[in-house]
């Protein structure tokens, strides 16, 4: 293929599917593990927010402002994400894994609102850039007919991390360190991940199409993509990401607040519902990538985005615990699946020399602005509307995002990155 793929990779004559090499399988585990900890950290804040608010004497409104401040880190992550095109994918992953390990540990040691917010902001910076680098690596290192599946499974591992977190938080809250112990435990496995990444090598596409051709951008050239023919495509995806994040950033985060205050659930009932929903959602989450490879990105988007919008509303409007848990199950699957669709599109529609920068602009710098303001707005509206109506209103985001996907984005299923980056 002329892209430096592992010599073990050959196409099966009977199935037409390219088997994964030993290195690709190891890389798959590494990238999936990196995604796992993103989900763990995100669910930690969602699970612990009421306890943290009580510990730090914060009202629900100021709790929303704290989350909004923390989420600014996802926007600042652009400045790290874009370095994938300057430093390379491998080096960026090394920096982000180490950075998150340290900031997670320090979160558990903080004693004030300001320091907690700052450490969690830094965690978001490193996590967001880490996921961007992982998705770019996945797109560049795996065969076209499996790209959707690989990206989808890596994204699904974020939900797996959320499941583990939901299961261990009730136990860790009983320890002498309370909510702090969650961040201590969350940082330990990352030390092993930091060691494991030493066996990772630079992606073949980056080496051949960027390093060997001398097309590496300068670290200070922040506006490079705005001068390229891909500016409009990046802005389109940034808008779609923003509309999606407006929903996903609040849909699960405030469910515990809603269930306790609006439905009278106990902490134990909430923990049980979250665990059941998260575990039961996993088959759907892991199936998303395969769905994209079978039916295509556009048809898959219709199923995922439309279904997600409906289930988010149900998760904040039904009254029975059984109904709410089922809606939460589908909501968890949907919020993860929407990100799989957009991760796939964003890594496919740009050339190798701009892929990291484009992901940083669309996902972090512009797209995640909505992730910053969504919790703030929802927290503000909840004071007068209640959590149910406040969060349900965010379901409008995926509906508008789906309209833009169908209007603006091409079908990319089964095509090599060199082809998909030229589609208009």
Image (tube, rainbow, N blue to C red):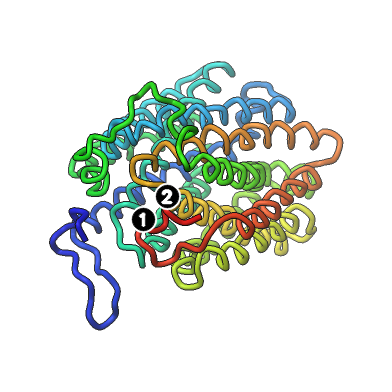
Is residue 371 or residue 359 the one in the foreground? 359
Left or right placement of residue 83 versus residue 290 in this view: left
Which residue occupies 38% across, 64% down? Answer: 415
SS category of the residue bearing label 2: helix
Which residue is under mark 1? 417
Is residue 109 or residue 422 the one in the foreground? 422
Choose top left, top right, bottom left or bottom right for residue 186.
Answer: top left
Residue 286 % position (x, y):
46, 63
Residue 9 % position (x, y):
19, 65
Which residue occupies 22% across, 39% down? Answer: 213
Which residue is under mark 2? 347
Disc 1 versus disc 2: distance between alpha carbons? Answer: 8 Å
> Quick check: marks 1 and 2 in contact, CB under 8 Å?
yes
Is residue 94 or residue 314 the one in the foreground? 94
Residue 53 % position (x, y):
65, 28
Q: Is residue 192 visible?
A: no
Which residue occupies 29% across, 73% down? Answer: 17
Q: Is residue 277 visible?
A: yes
Vertical order, 3 against 44 (above or below): below
Count of numbered badges drawn on the protein: 2
Residue 400 % position (x, y):
70, 52
Q: Sequence-wise, which precedes: disc 1 or disc 2?
A: 2
Instruction: State which mark lies toward you, 1 or 2.
Output: 1
């Amino acid at each position: 293929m002329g892209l430096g793929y592992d010599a073990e990779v050959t196409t099966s004559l009977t199935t037409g599917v390219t088997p994964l090499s030993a290195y690709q399988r190891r890389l798959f585990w590494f990238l999936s593990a990196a995604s796992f900890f993103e989900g763990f950290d995100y669910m930690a804040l969602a699970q612990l927010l009421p306890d943290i608010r009580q510990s730090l004497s914060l009202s629900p409104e100021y709790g929303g402002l704290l989350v909004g401040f923390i989420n600014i880190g996802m926007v600042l992550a652009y400045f790290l994400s874009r370095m994938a095109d300057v430093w390379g994918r491998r080096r960026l992953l090394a920096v982000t894994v180490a950075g998150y390990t340290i900031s997670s540990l320090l979160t558990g040691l903080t004693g004030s609102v300001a320091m907690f917010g700052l450490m969690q902001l830094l965690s978001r910076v490193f996590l967001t850039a880490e996921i961007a680098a992982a998705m770019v690596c996945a797109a560049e290192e795996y065969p076209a007919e499996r790209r959707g599946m690989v990206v989808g499974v890596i994204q699904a591992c974020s939900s797996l991390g959320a499941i583990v977190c939901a299961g261990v938080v009730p136990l860790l809250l009983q320890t002498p360190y309370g909510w702090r112990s969650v961040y201590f435990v969350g940082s330990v496995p990352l030390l092993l991940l930091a060691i494991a990444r030493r066996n990772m090598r630079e992606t073949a596409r980056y080496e051949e199409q960027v390093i060997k051709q001398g097309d590496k951008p300068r670290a200070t050239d922040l506006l490079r993509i705005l001068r390229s023919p891909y500016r409009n495509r990046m802005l389109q995806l940034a808008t779609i990401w923003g509309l999606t994040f407006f929903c996903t950033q609040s849909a699960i985060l405030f469910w515990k607040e809603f269930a306790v205050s609006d439905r009278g659930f106990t902490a134990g009932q909430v923990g049980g519902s979250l665990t059941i929903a998260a575990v039961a959602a996993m088959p759907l989450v892991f199936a998303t990538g395969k769905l994209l490879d079978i039916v295509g990105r556009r048809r898959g988007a219709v199923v995922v985005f439309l279904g997600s919008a409906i289930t988010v509303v149900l998760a904040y409007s039904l009254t029975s615990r059984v109904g709410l848990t089922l809606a939460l199950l589908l909501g968890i699957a949907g919020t993860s699946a929407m990100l799989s669709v957009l991760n796939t599109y964003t890594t496919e529609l740009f050339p190798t020399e701009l892929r990291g920068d484009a992901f940083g602009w669309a996902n972090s710098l512009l797209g995640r602005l909505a992730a910053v303001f969504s919790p703030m707005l929802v927290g503000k509206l909840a004071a007068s509307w209640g959590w149910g109506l406040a969060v349900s209103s965010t379901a409008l985001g995926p509906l508008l995002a789906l309209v833009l996907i169908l209007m603006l984005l091409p079908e990319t299923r089964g095509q090599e990155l060199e082809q998909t980056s030229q589609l208009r």
